[in-house]
Image (cartoon, helix red, strand yellow):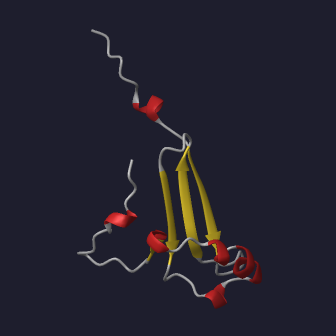
Amino acid sequence: MVNTEASPAAKAMLIFFDTEFTELGIDPRLISIGLISEFGDRTFYAELSDTYTEKDCSEFVRLAVLPHLEGGNSVMAVAEPTPNSVMPESAKVQC
């Protein structure tokens, strides 16, 4: 019998990502990250709420990035993990 299932390599896909940072200088801090599969059927987007303040942002970021953040369910905190910490369901990628 011939195995007709695709090999793991054949199931590989491209993932594209985009990030926004407070600035591109000495201390850039992540503001948001978005990922999308090559076919557009799998996506992830998150805005970080505790990695920066508005004063950390360059003028460009304050004018061109911050006004376009979505907020709501896409906001998540990046806290120091503890031994018993669990990733919240809202932060898990659904594939």
Q: Position of residue 94 (x, y in %)?
A: 38, 52
- Relative to 91, say whether 14 is above or below: above
Position in image of residue 81 (x %, y %): 34, 77
- Compared to residue 39, the image places residue 56 above or below, namely below
| Point 64% across, 73% down: residue | 21
Left or right: 24, with 30 as reference point = right
Q: Return the residue found at the far bottom.
A: 55
Q: Is residue 64 above or below residue 95?
A: below
Give the residue at x 40% y 80%: 79
Depth check, front residue: 78 or 8: 78
Q: Position of residue 63 (x, y in %)?
A: 74, 79
Left/right of residue 82 with respect to residue 72 in the rendered view: left
- Which corner quadrant holds the N terminus? top left
Q: Is 22 left, or right, of 38 in this rendering?
A: right
Between 16 and 44, which is closer to the camera in this rendering?
44
* Residue located 66% across and 77% down the image: 67
